[in-house]
Image (tube, rainbow, N blue to C red):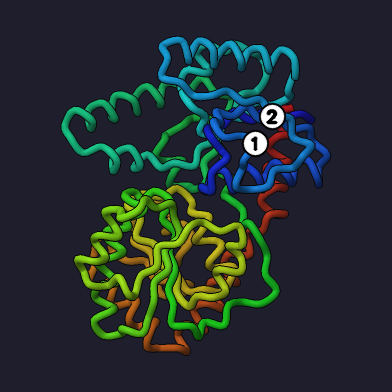
Amino acid sequence: MKILYITPDITDSGGISRVISLKTDYLVSNLEYEVCILSVNDSYPDCFYDFNPAIKWFNIKKSKNLFFLQSYIRSIKKIISTEKPDVIVICDAVLWLFIPWFVKTDIPMVFETHFSVSFEKVKNKSLYTKFRAELVHFIKQKTMEKFTCFVAVTNEESKEWNAKKNIIISNPVSFSVAEKADLVNKKAMSVCMNPYIKGLDRLLLVWSKIVEKHSDWILDIYGKWELNSEYQKMADTLNISDNVNFLLPTKDIQNSYNQFSIFLMTSRSEAFPMVLLEAMISGVPCIAYDCPSGPRAIIKNGENGFLIEDGNVNFFAEKLELLIEDENLRFQMGKRAKESVAVYDLEIIMKEWQNFFESLR
């Protein structure tokens, strides 16, 4: 079977890049599928994650030129004509809502997204941008009907998009571990590739309350940082700079989780966060805001982690302090976290994808 993925830029260290690299490698290595990727990548072949060398790449550079859409659609049509895929997967592709209107084919065309509807609502603040977001969402809903099927990562996301033809396939855990983290280091961890959407300002406020009583604890935040960014300045203002490290993304993320005792997520919007799965499979207890979707699909409050009322800084700090002070609770919650995400094993999730693709053929 041959699959054509049409994607955004997947050369970075983000979650979409991570999940596509995992799934396509499995399709090629384990199922002997042929995989082609058409991606809007300015920096290919400098990918953060490793992609299977058997994948056939097609790259187009994004442009603000008025004729970019025309060129983009022409490229898609040409690739479909020459490669003759059995299934086309539009995975959060650039200008995806135009594709099914301008590309006419009998080949099954699937839309797969890793963004919650709340993402646009959070990102847009002014009345104009909110109105524009609602209009775009209406158009997206109409476009959804043009696809053969919509693949959502959670039940909640499926309901948000309200697609008539849909299936739910969650993200897989990106690695397996033989032993869980020992949870003895006085260190907490977070990952913020998009600082505002990931709520980095909210995270720093929470941490400022923790440092008042637990000044020996350190918070490491992985992301892409500009020198003297507004968040580094915010840490200075809150007098927590000595207790916060702004670190660059690492490929050895598996080993990184094992160095920490608690994982924190203060996102304003999520779909199905890979980093939460990775922390939990490593046996690290997690605390997350109950934002419109995402964490609530993974965390069972009080059992395998803590789910905090969205934006409630004091309650978040209270539960974090509880995990800091109660080592036994950390151990028990970390153990249950690891056990609970076993259902997202790569083999299990990819069997669902295989069955889905075969059903389309």
Q: Quadrant of residue 217?
A: bottom left
Residue 249 visible (yes or no): yes
Q: Position of residue 50 (x, y in %)?
A: 68, 47
Is 242 situated above or below 192? below
Is 318 situated above or below 297? below
- In the picture, the quarter occupied by the C terminus is top right
Residue identified by numbered label 2: 57
Q: Amino acid at mark 2?
A: Trp
Q: Position of residue 315 (x, y in %)?
A: 26, 72
Q: Amino acid at mark 1?
A: Pro
Q: Which residue ends up furthest to the right in the rendered image?
A: 32
> What residue do we see at 27% from left, 69% from top?
206
> What residue do we see at 51% from left, 59% from top?
275
> What residue do we see at 26% from left, 37% from top?
124
- In the picture, the quarter occupied by the N terminus is top right
Q: Are marks 2 and 1 in contact (CB under 8 Å)?
A: yes
Q: Residues within 10 Å of mark 1 (few under 14, many from 20)?
A: few
Q: Quadrant of residue 306?
A: bottom left
* Along the line of sight, the residue nearer the viewer: 152 or 268: 268
Number of numbered discs: 2
Residue identified by numbered label 1: 45
Image depth: mark 2 or mark 1 in front: 1
Q: Is residue 77 left or right of residue 300?
A: right
* Along the line of sight, the residue nearer the viewer: 152 or 249: 249
